[in-house]
Amino acid sequence: MAESTATTEREFMLDVRTQDMEVNMGPQHPATHGVMRILMRADGEICTGAQPHLGYLHRCAEKIGENVEWLQYLPYTDRYDYLAAMNNNLGYSLAVEKLMGIEIPRRALMIRTICAELNRIGSHLIAFGTYGLDIGAFTPFLYMFREREWMMALFEKICGARLTYSYIRIGGVFNDAPPGWLSEVERFCDVFEEKWQEYVDLLMVNHIFVQRTANIGVISPAMALDFGLSGPMVRGSGIDWDLRRDMPYELYAEIWKAGAFSIPLGKGERGALGDCWDRAYVRVMEMMESIKIVRWCLDSIAPGPVIADIPKTLRVPAGEAYVGIENPRGELGHYVVSDGGKVAVRCRVRGPSFTNLAVVEELMPGTLIADAVAIIGSTDIVVGETDR
Amino acid sequence: MSAAVKYVKNVVDTLVTTLVGMKITGKYLLQKPITVQYPDERLPIPNRYRGIHYLEQEKCIECLACARACPIDCIEMDAVRHGKELEWISFTLDYQKCMFCELCVYPCPKDCIHMGTEFAFVSYDRSEFVHDLLSYRGMSRDAKQRMVEAEEKKKAKEAAKAAKEAAKVAAQAAKEGKEAAGGGGEAKA
Amino acid sequence: MFTEVLSAAPQSGTNAINDFLAGVKPEFVPAWAVPLTAVGIAVGITIALVSVIAMFSTWLERKVSGHIQCRYGPMRAGWHGWLQPLADGVKLLLKEDLVPVGADRVMYVVAPAIVLASVLAALAAYPLAPGFFFADLDLGIFFILAMTSTTTIGVVMAGWSSNSKWSLYGAMREAAQVVAYEIPLGISLLVPIMVAGSFNLLEVSRGQAGMFGMDWYIWPWVNPFMLPCFVLFFIAILAETKRAPFDLPEAESELVAGFMTEYSGIRWSFFFMEEYAAMYLYSVVGAFFFFGGFESPLTWGAAKVFGDGHVLYHCAAGLTLILKGFAGVFLMMWLRWTLPRVRIDQVMTLGYKYLTPLALACVLGGSLWEVFVAPILPWRNG
């Protein structure tokens, strides 16, 4: 740095270098979605640098996968993205079933799809509610919980747990839906459509919310592809990529061909393409698409077996398989390697939140601190999935 | 759009969306809340709920299938075998470790371990969380009776077998004696 | 000499207490003790009033927020939780008195006191009933606005002395926000002041006397620029009292509790009391200038039945004012639970680029109306 060439006192005062303030957001902070620490450098209110620090919620899930049997690992899969546990179970089960090469009964596929989509709604509800909370609107959070409570009660009736289900198992689902469950799901869909309109009116189109999130955290399509983002992060930037349609698993190929759902994309309606509002909007629209998928499944479901015939002590044939599914947050990938034994050799999980978080470091410099909170909220990360 | 139009639009948008939002919150202000005031009121718990386990002790054969199925090894059991009957000492589940995954319920061959609807488990002492699921220790009266009957039956069987053996031996001896006598007789004649 | 100074100041309510005490004074009490006691009692009544208002407001806030969010709010402390503020107060009193390491001790301790004292001082100029007030100031509203803006000093002191970066952020935001919104606050009040012709709150209230509230200043036939002025005034007081959507200084989700983060126990409750007292005070100001102050069908009826000087008339008037004040407070709470937070630079934009020019335009229009149109309107007394 050059030596100061100030001669008069006034010039000297102008030459005084102020230091950027280093502020720690987290690990305990209301706005970081879990225990995560973001080291921010801020010049007054403007953020000049950000660096996420992870690992506060690391629970060695992948290492545990190498030590417990195939079926015993299922409860651990619940716990990485605890807000969308059904999808985690589904991803793991699909990977192991691919290795085993077994066929899943149709009713099981239907119930799995219903559960995964209901859980997607639940997860997007939390994303939406907590995003409102970050921006300062306290009420949509409570309204969101009301719908999510209903969804959790539905899951409680079918599998006995409210958050970590361990319901979608290798070979199908654990047990069949109790009588009356399917009609209750249909009632949920009907009521949810009314409430959805309220969410849009209360928060999404609210001018203050739009001002807070439009043109903030703009991820251009090129940036999205460079960082390897997935899910609503990439669809918010207008890129048409959804694993349910492009790399279908379960029944999604059939549902897509029947034209039952569409893929909402960000269009830059309220600001630049790929800003925070677009991503929030994509999530809100995806809730409606999930309702459509659930309705299609309710119409087409038929009685039958719900689990394939798998031995009690499971030995998976040797080989490796990777299956990526569309988690509410992005592409959740399970890579399992087996040597023919009772225990996996390697069980690697590709968590979408981990990859999505990386873009935060690029987006934050130049924004105000309030915007930093908005950007982190729009990535919709769950630290359980980031750290595993 | 010119700056003036944008200005006016901003003002109008803010006012309109504020009023729309207020209408929604006002609607809920006047409605009855949905809270269930625990513990005075409670929601019904579905019967598949994964709560504290209960064991149908009569059926259990101590095969350890549930203990092997548990990912965290929470289940430990101890019993003395008397033939087919069990004299129970303990069957503990460590709730400090249990993650209520229900993997222990499925492998049971006799379908005797279940998860109930109890969820509240409060204690001042950690040792109480290593919960014993037994409803009685030792052997039940029926089991004892069955054991006694089984032993008697066994004894009777053994006695019968011994008697049969003895009879067989006696018959054999008689036969040999006869043969010997017959042989002797033949030799005499 | 001391007695002369005290009784020379214009104090009507305190005067009444003073006279009463002088009448019942026992022999052994010296003469100078009477005015002092009178002032002490008046101050005590004010503090009691503020505390009760703040306590009731906290209960109201929790119930209103609860019912908006489909839940109940406090239910266990008394019927529907009406004793909850009392329970909270007792809890706060019993908390550890803590000063963070590295905090500037003097400023840390003095800041909440400054904040509460300025609101209490503002309450001195506000009349409880047409015949019961502590100070009949001709500068009424001016004094109130001046005193309530000194709370900013306390807030900035609190944020700085807490020795925490997040508190500092809250304090700086608060200073910028309050200074920006003082301008539209004052300007938007100019139109009713013009119509009333006085800063004195009692005068303003008397000017709106009439049957069934037809003479309230808010109505468009009095002056059509009153309604936009009220909207601007309301937005300005939301910003002044740091209520959502302008609650950045205590933005929970970003800064934990902003400038109040390091405060706990009774010191924290000072800030909260100040917030609710200021909310009530500003909505009472709004009630005086736009909604008739003491005048309402209830007061009019009481005047007809009991007469102007009767104590029940004063009670009716006082009750009317309290109801109007709490209606304003309720509206502020309703808005808080509906709207998201506005970012600090947008707050500044809103204040300087939207509210101030619009307020000036309203003043211009309002004054033109007063000069040219009002004289020819029969209901404006020609």
Image: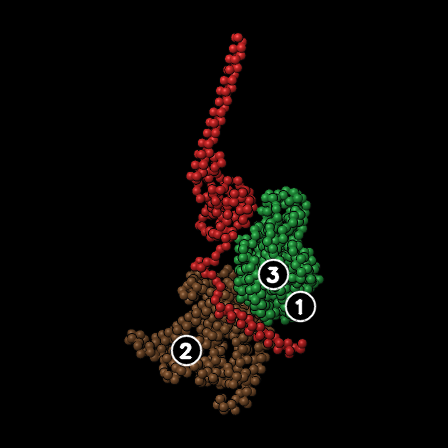
Chain colours: A green, B red, C brown
Residue topped by disc 3: A295
Residue at 54%, 53% in the rendered image: A159
Label 1 or label 2, whichever lies nearer to me, is 1
Q: Which mark is residue C318?
A: 2
Residue at 60%, 55% in the rendered image: A302
Mark 3 residue type: Arg
Q: Callout 3: 10 Å neighbours few (<14), some, many (20+)?
A: some
Please report whichever mark, 1 or 3, sits nearer to the chain's N-terminal start: 1
Q: Nearer the viewer, residue B135 or C260?
A: B135
- Residue B181 to residue B26: above or below: above
- Residue C347 lies, in percent from the top left, at 58, 72
Q: Nearer the viewer, residue C280 or B31?
A: B31
- At numbered mark 1, what does the secondary structure look like: helix, strand or loop? loop
| Extreme-top residue of the structure | B189
Residue B124 shows in the view: yes
- Residue C291 lies, in percent from the top left, at 48, 80
Q: Nearer the viewer, residue A58 or A26?
A: A58
